[in-house]
Image (tube, rainbow, N blue to C red):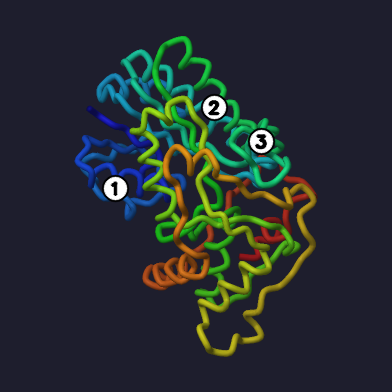
Amino acid sequence: MTILVTGSAGFIGSYVFDLLVSEGHNVYGVDDLSGGFMRNVGDKKRFIKLDLRDRRATARLISKLKPKIIFHLAADAHEGRSQFTPLSASDRNYSAYINLLVPAIKNNLEKMVLVSTMSVYGAGQVPFKERSMPMPESVYGISKHAMERVTVSLAKVYGFKHVIIRPHNVYGPRQNLTDPYRNVIGIFINQLLKGKPFYIYGGKQKRAYSHIDDVVPHLVKAAYLHSCEGGVFNLGSDEAVTLDFLSEEIIRQFFYDEKVPSNLLPRHIPARPFEVKYAYCDHREAKKYIGFEPKISLSSGIKDTIDWARRIGPQKFTYLEDLELDHHLLPETWKKKLY
């Protein structure tokens, strides 16, 4: 049985690919390398560079491989930036997914494992429950919710099985340290590696940060449990903390018992007006059907990530040349390219 992992050079996708290979599956990976890295690709002979926005090239590949199971992780996963790059968010998420899903159905797809996001919940009541009504507010969340809905709709018509996974705030080794628009843990650590301070918007926002090793094994496990078919599952930490607490933990793990240089203390700037303040999940369904139980504490996970980041060294942040909507509401760090 051939399995395809999209976004296989990316953060979560590369772990999914490696785990499937270790279990003996016949796995292929695709990625356009817009946010992934070849250093994440474990089996380069089974890797294909492909932009899923290219409808014909995607159809040709699917016709050749005829995957029975697809783990779809390729995405423009920039929730905050999507308000300023709505074309990219739509094209790289919904349109790219349809380009993949249609030929997959034609070639007898048996199961789609769609990796979505907790952004589909918007600013709803926390903790977000799997059975809560999605009310996405960002363009990114809207595009991912549309992907969920089209999966459910076409599965009913064409008979393939599906599982929807909503991970949240995943971090750990292999995280993209070059991205100035997302992944707050990676941004903070990369700045410290450069000997520069990082910026905190507000600080009272509350999230639950989820280590990659807690998320991926259960994501893959869900694909093979009949009880999970047709289900939606939140995957991530139960330990919700403020952004201020997170920054303190990163500094504590980075400097150990050393005194923190005053020039590297974080700098607070006003909270972003469009950001959801409280966003974390309930994992009742995942615990019931997958046996999900996060085990890695924030402190040990942060230490693990810092140790890996030290090995690869500081990375240069990569900004887009132009945002689709350049607006006065742009976050200060993006507008002035402070990183």
Q: Are marks 3 and 2 in contact (CB under 8 Å)?
A: no
Examine the image and state in which quarter residue 143 appears: top right
Q: Which residue is disc 1 drawn over?
A: 18
**Which kind of residue does numbered mark 2 sit on?**
Met
- Rendering coords of residue 264 (x, y %): 62, 80
**Which kind of residue does numbered mark 1 sit on?**
Asp
Real-space Cα separation, disc 1 to disc 2, in angstroms: 25 Å
Residue 39 appears left or right of 122: left
The answer to whether residue 76 is seen in the rendering is: no
Q: Which SS class for mark 1?
A: helix
The 10 Å Cα crowd at callout 3, few under 14, some 14 to 19, many 20 or more, is many
Q: Which SS class for mark 3?
A: helix
The 10 Å Cα crowd at callout 2, few under 14, some 14 to 19, many 20 or more, is many
Rendered residue at 41%/42% (across/down)? 219
Rendered residue at 45%/45% (across/down)? 34
- Rendering coords of residue 36 (x, y %): 41, 48
Rendered residue at 41%/29% (across/down)? 227
The 10 Å Cα crowd at callout 1, few under 14, some 14 to 19, many 20 or more, is some
- Rendering coords of residue 56 (x, y %): 39, 20
